[in-house]
Image (cartoon, rainbow, N blue to C red):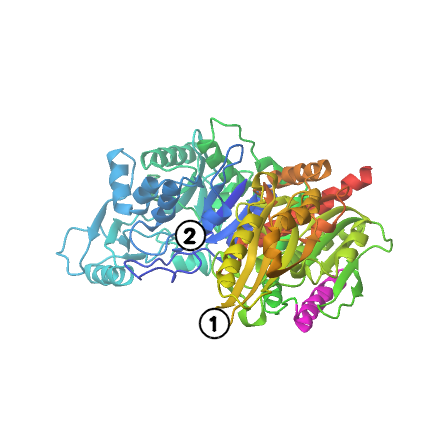
Amino acid sequence: MKVAIIYNKNVSKVINKFGMQNKEIYNPNTIKRVAKALEDGGHNVSIIDGDMHVIERIQDFMPQVMEGEKMGMVFNMAYGIQGESRYTHIPSMLEMLGIPYVGSSPTGHALALDKVVAKIILQKHNIPTPNFWVLSDQDFEVEEFDFPVIVKPKMESVSFGLKVVDNIPDLRKAVKYILDEFQQPALVEQFIPGREFAVGLLGNNPVDAFPVLEIDLENDPNGIQTFEDKTAKPKGKICPADLPAEKALEMINLSKEAFRVLQLRDFARVDFRMDKDGNVYILELNSMASLGPSGSYPFAANVAGYDYKALVNRMLDVSALRYFTNTPFESDAEKVYKKVSLDTKIRGFLRNRQSNIEKLLEEMVNINSFVRNVEGVNQLGALVKKNLSQLGFSHQAFPQVEVGNVHYFSNSESEEIDILLLGSLDTDIKRASHEYYFDSEQKLFGTGIWENKGGLTVLISALQSLKFTRLLKKFKIGILLTSDESLQGKFASGIVKNISNNAKYVLGLHGAFVDGGLVTSRSGAALYHCHANLIKNDDATLVSDAVSFLTKLVAAWVDLSDPDKGLVIAPRKFNIETNITDPYVNASVNLSVRFNELKQVDKLDSKIMKVIPKKYKKYIDLQLEGGLRRPSMIKTEKVDQLWKKIKNIAERLDIILREEHRWSSADICYVDERIFQIDGLGPAGAKPSNKSEYILRHSLLERAALLAIIITELNGEVAKK
């Protein structure tokens, strides 16, 4: 299942700073620990910052569910950034977007977070809770308070601002602190000397309770646990608490009843005080019980038999069951006790190296590798060579004078290889238009980042993960990087043909489209250049006739297109220069052709010449040259078999893939059609016209994991044969 962990990382990313500012935030190490637990449970995990860009990030990672696909979920760990009822903000957005999530609804969070409302509801249902007062001004009129009292913010958690006082002057000071520091009313609650307990709840129908946990106040009946205690020096925990069985059961039953009346779901923690006479009182319910390493919730869960991995996966399970009770749902919780899968190891390795992977990509993108910039193309090739040499790959260069060198890498001494990974180094963007690397929260931008450099980064990252899992040496892998793909493989075509003939599988590293397209066929390319001059220059009327003729001629050529059969003809450039006073016509036309079958091009030469009327040959000198530039990649039975194999792997990894025909040609078109082949294994993104080329940030790791698993499983297929 796709699982997005949302938490608050950068609280400054809002339109305006407004209202109460949140002081509660998860340690990033805890977020990583939860992510690893979910990955160990077999899930495809992404960590997302819950700021004003959260909707776009979720949409990129978790696209709209189509027929037959699994719906993903959010593991909500976002406490909110600012304003009232901050726990409700992300759940409310998720409700609007139609995305399932772990934890309580906006209603449940709002009721539990507002301690005054929660206590009123508890009292209404005869659930014991200490008496209380609400103060909105430090200059309150003196009332009959049952001192000692404890002062706290009305709508905060994790023991922020706690202060026990036993007189009016100290009470005024404590109230003023709450008003100034938290910008909200102060809850003044009768303090219950005695012992402090917590009950962890997990589930919905039924709700299960962990053993009652006691906070070790070191026999101090007036002791409390402040926020500083929880973060700097957590008090000890005793679980199960030393209580009579009936008293523990009483707390558990009260906890479940409070959980119900406050409309909570999935999980929560209920805090109690017990006085010297054994009377118990609910202090509050935390609808987002902390999963931090010192938290009482995971501590009690461990006593109940859930280690950390099992707890996190069980939290996801109970939430998923709540949403998907009418559809088959296979729990992943039991998987965490089994041997960690290869998928999990690879994903964990890649996630932990995300910053390094993005730095490598940035270095690649910032190298200008325009196809005619020989120095830049070779610089990029040297960078790739440096990384692959560290992985044990040998290197062979094919020098090219007009463009950069073609590179071949292999970890096998034999010419025969199992898998050939095919990529390119050059781009078609001239030096002056090169766009250097920049990023947003969810996208990475720069020249070549989608077309080829993202795929090169995916390649290196996937191989690094295989080395980490000690599998790389078991595979015979070749890597061929061309330097003239922008020129239709003018120089490298023969190299591609020769090396690919020694491979059982060829995998292309071009970028995928945003919807997850994997390329199972590509159009071939042909290019024709037509040059026309006016032969006679003594008649001005011939100028207009010639222009009219050339315009109609180009239209006639375009009409030779047959889109239904994959044949498309379009003028790439059409320039005409004329003069009537001193009659002349000079015209040039580049015709770009895309086709699916080679025989379409074989017939095209004669068809192009046939549409030229003979009468115009008397006064117009028309020269036509060109033809086939690159063949097409045909979807054969072997391509279809490979597509289905990869599709099954992707479904297991919760990665969306769609089959796609791409109209653009590429070097993989030179691979013999009798070889298993597929393209588009680079990261998802786009190369919009006149806009910045980009990839989706999360797809960089996703595609690296996919490629690594593909290599592993294709090697297994080869071994069977």
Q: In the image shown, does 409 or 617 lie closer to the viewer?
A: 617
Which part of the image, by quadrant, shows the C terminus? top right
Q: Position of residue 694 (x, y in %)?
A: 53, 58
Which residue appears farthest toward the top when viewing the image?
326
Identify which residue is drawn at 48% across, 43% down: 63
Point out which mark residue 54 bears.
2
Q: Specify whether 195 is left or right of 302.
A: left
Q: Position of residue 124 (x, y in %)?
A: 24, 35
Say above or below: 324 vs 171. above
Q: What is the crowding at mark 2: few (fewer than 14 residues within 10 Å), some, or many (at least 20)? A: some
The span from disc 1 to disc 2 (Cα, nearest Å) is 65 Å
- Residue 492 lies in magenta, yes or no? no
State which quadrant residue 531 falls in.
Answer: bottom right
Q: Is residue 65 visible?
A: yes
Q: In the image shown, does 574 or 679 lie closer to the viewer?
A: 574
Badge 1 marks a residue whose secondary structure is loop
Say above or below: 638 vs 606. above
Name the amino acid, label 1: Thr
Identify which residue is drawn at 71% across, 35% down: 637
Magenta-drawn segment = 372-391
Q: What is the crowding at mark 1: few (fewer than 14 residues within 10 Å), some, or many (at least 20)? A: few
State which quadrant residue 287 falls in.
Answer: top left
Q: Which residue is mark 1?
A: 581
Q: In the image shown, does 258 or 594 lie closer to the viewer?
A: 594
Q: Are marks 1 and 2 in contact (CB under 8 Å)?
A: no
